[in-house]
Image (tube, rainbow, N blue to C red):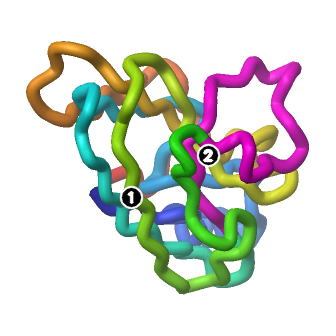
Amino acid sequence: MEIVADWNQVARFAKGNVRTDIIDFNGYYSGNITLMVPTGWSVRIAFTNGSANFRHSLMVTRVYAQSEMPVTLQLEDAMWSAYTDPPERIHPKERAQLSFVAQQAGSYFLACARQTHLMDGHWIGFEVRDGLEQAVAIIHEGRFVPSDLPGRP
């Protein structure tokens, strides 16, 4: 699959040349999409930092409640050693590959490890499910901020 960090950056700047707090992956943020794969699948992600100005990354982590989110994700926070390398420094317009095996059924985050980005909503849901036969994406329409819908794929 392909994941682009800060996919909606251009659309946000167009809304009055002010960047909002919402940082996204392919237009999604704060768990308003969940990507699901079968247990045992080999997952390959072509990651692109679509930002013109900010470093981003991608890491598979456990699920965090808002009150327990770390300021910065560390290497030991990565499930199955699944993170872009370096974990906090994929520069603007750079690309990276992330490959791992979805080893254990459960709910996880695909998150940016950069300082405060997880806390600011730069994460989407990731679920590994027994009995699933193909990858599935579920959009959670009720989790979007009504004023921030531009450019969703």
Q: In the figure, is residue 68 to the left or right of 51?
A: right
Judged left or right of residue 33, residue 16 is right
Q: Which of 92 and 87 is in front in this view?
A: 87
Q: In this view, does 150 lie above or below 2?
A: above
Q: What stretch is highlighted in magenta?
A: 56-78
Whole-percent x and y of residue 19?
75, 63
Q: Can you see residue 75?
A: yes
- What separation in Å lies between label 2 and label 1 (alpha carbons)? 15 Å
The image's mark for residue 46 is none
Q: Name the mark on residue 111.
A: 2
Q: Is mark 2 on a helix, strand or loop?
A: strand
User: Where residue 115 sits: x, y (%)?
Assistant: 86, 56
Amino acid of disc 1 = Ser
Q: Which residue is drawn at 36% across and 36% down?
A: 102
Image quadrant in which you'd find residue 129: top left
Which amino acid lies under the numbered mark 2 shown in the image of this protein?
Answer: Ala
Farthest residue to the left: give it.
133
In the rendered image, which quarter contains the N terminus?
Answer: bottom left
Give 5 or 153, whichever is nearer the viewer: 5
Instruction: For residue 148, say whether it is visible.
Output: no
